[in-house]
Amino acid sequence: MGLWTLLQGFLLFANALAILNEDRFLARRGWSFADVSGGRRKSLKEQVVGLIYAAQYMRLPLIVLNIITIVVKLVSGVDSCCPGDEKFVVGSQNRECNQLRLCRMRHSVC
């Protein structure tokens, strides 16, 4: 696992936190900002709610980071269709990977 994969994982996690809706999801479970704010000591629940709200506040930078990630993946041409082959370049002559890629393009599932 490389640094790029780790950064993509953090970006996916931040995206998951950013889309949580307070009215539909968080408030029903007692995780709204109003329910946990107050007090001098921060419990783990208060810290998690603070992290969720920080991710929701940073939606615009998340959108920009998502666009940058998509552009980098498109430009680099890296396609990890073969298990264990993270360096597979789209123009490679590896027959098994090319067959798997064609199968995915035609049927979406192989």
Image: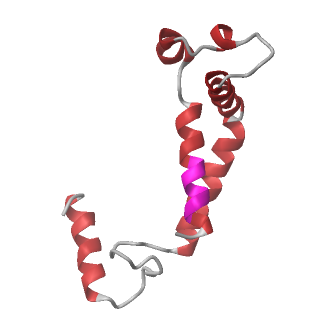
Q: How is the image coloured?
A: secondary structure
| Residue appearing at x 67%, y 31% in the figure | 51
Residue 59: % across, % down: 67, 35
| Residue appearing at x 35%, y 91% in the figure | 93
| Residue appearing at x 61%, y 58% in the figure | 7
Q: Which of 32/75 is in front?
A: 32
Residue 96 belongs to magenta span: no
90 relative to 44, above or below:
below
Left or right side of 17 for 96: left
Left or right side of 51 for 70: left
Q: Quadrant of residue 4?
A: bottom right
Q: Which of 58/75 is in front?
A: 58
Left or right side of 103 for 21: right
| Residue appearing at x 53%, y 67% in the figure | 74
102 relative to 91, above or below:
above
Farthest bottom residue in view: 93
Quarter of the picture containing the C terminus is: bottom left
Total label count? 0
Residue 10 belongs to magenta span: yes
Residue 12: % across, % down: 54, 47
Instruction: Please identify the dominant SS of the magenta region.
Output: helix
Residue range of the region highlighted in magenta in the rendering: 5-11
Q: Which of 78/37 is in front?
A: 37
Residue 41: % across, % down: 77, 19
